[in-house]
């Protein structure tokens, strides 16, 4: 139980940090691509939160890739 709680906290803070780096504070400010990104991140984060057999980095790495890709594309 405490492992699931810890994993959830780690993913929550990691995702919140990534979304803050994107600079959006409200859902109304999101572009359609960023809204899709938010849904993808939620889906990617839910799997390692629920299944303790999946390593935590298996959820963190794809989220990091998506956030990085979005930030790079927004700069370009």
Image: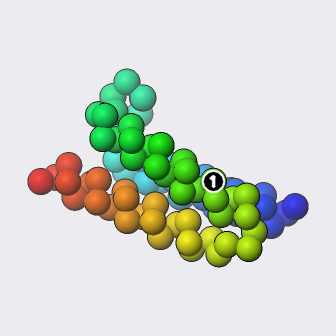
Residue 19 drawn at (x, y percent)? 43, 47
From this view, report whether residue 61 is shown above or below residue 31: below
Locate the N terminus by quadrant. Answer: bottom right
Q: Please give left or right for residue 45 compared with residue 41 in the image.
A: right
Q: Residues within 10 Å of mark 1 (few under 14, many from 20)?
A: few
Residue 75 drawn at (x, y percent)? 16, 52
Q: Please give left or right for residue 76 compared with residue 28 in the image.
A: left
Say if residue 74 shows up in the picture: yes
Query: Residue shown at 65%/63% (left/top)?
Result: 48
Q: Please give left or right for residue 10 compared with residue 63 in the image.
A: right
Colour pattern of the rendering: rainbow
Q: Residue furthest right?
A: 1
From this view, report whether residue 67 is shown above or below residue 32: below
Label 1: state its secondary structure: helix
Q: Please give left or right for residue 35 compared with residue 52 in the image.
A: left
Please give the residue where the numbered disc 1 appears in the rendered image.
Answer: 46
Residue 10 drawn at (x, y percent)? 64, 61
Q: What is the total number of numbered labels drawn onto the structure image?
A: 1
Frontmost residue, 28 versus 35: 35
Q: Residue furthest top?
A: 28
Query: Residue shown at 20%/49% (left/top)?
Result: 74
Say if residue 6 shows up in the picture: no
From this view, report whether residue 68 is shown above or below residue 35: below
Q: Residue furthest left?
A: 76
Query: Residue shown at 29%/34% (left/top)?
Result: 31
Frontmost residue, 56 versus 14: 56
Residue 7 drawn at (x, y percent)? 70, 63
Locate the C terminus by quadrant. Answer: bottom left
Query: Residue shown at 56%/72% (left/top)?
Result: 58
């Amino acid at each position: 139980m405490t492992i699931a709680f810890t994993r959830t906290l780690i993913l929550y803070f990691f995702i919140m940090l990534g979304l803050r780096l994107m600079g959006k504070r409200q859902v109304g400010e999101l572009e359609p691509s960023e809204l899709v990104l938010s849904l993808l991140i939620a889906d990617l984060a839910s799997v390692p939160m629920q299944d303790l057999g999946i390593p935590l980095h298996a959820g963190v790495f794809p989220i990091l890739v998506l956030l990085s890709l979005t930030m790079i594309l927004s700069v370009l």
